[in-house]
Amino acid sequence: MSIPSIQPRALFGLHSKIIQNAHFVTDTEILYPAGAVLVLHDYSEKQQRYIKLMEKSVNTELITISPNR
């Protein structure tokens, strides 16, 4: 079984000032901040879900993911 490889074409709204700003949540899902939301992108299903932050003025500076997800 080969390991999947991702090559981004365009990342709209991705906060590039955050170190390690994209995280694999599962084998096919990536979590990353974009604007005032966190985006959960499933690239195999070609679907996205959004987690809205409490306040629009809040800037995301840290994302922590639990090992058991």
Image (cartoon, helix red, strand yellow):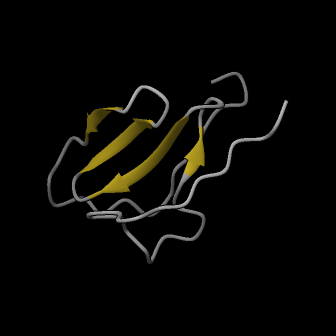
Q: Quadrant of residue 69?
A: top right
Residue at 57 percent across and 71 percent down: it is 19
Which residue occupies the extreme right position in the image?
Answer: 1
Horizontal side of 8 relative to 48 (left or right) equals right
Q: In the picture, which quadrant includes the N terminus?
A: top right
Q: Quadrant of residue 67?
A: top right
Question: What is the total number of numbered labels drawn onto the structure image?
Answer: 0
Residue 49 is situated, as x and y percent measured from the top left of the image, at: 30, 30
Horizontal side of 25 relative to 43 (left or right) equals right
6 and 54: which is toward the camera = 6
Residue at 58 percent across and 48 percent down: it is 23
Which residue occupies the extreme bottom position in the image?
Answer: 17
Q: Is 64 located above or below residue 14 in the figure?
A: above
Residue 63 is situated, as x and y percent measured from the top left of the image, at: 52, 50
Q: Is 19 located above or below residue 23 in the figure?
A: below
Q: Quadrant of residue 65?
A: top right
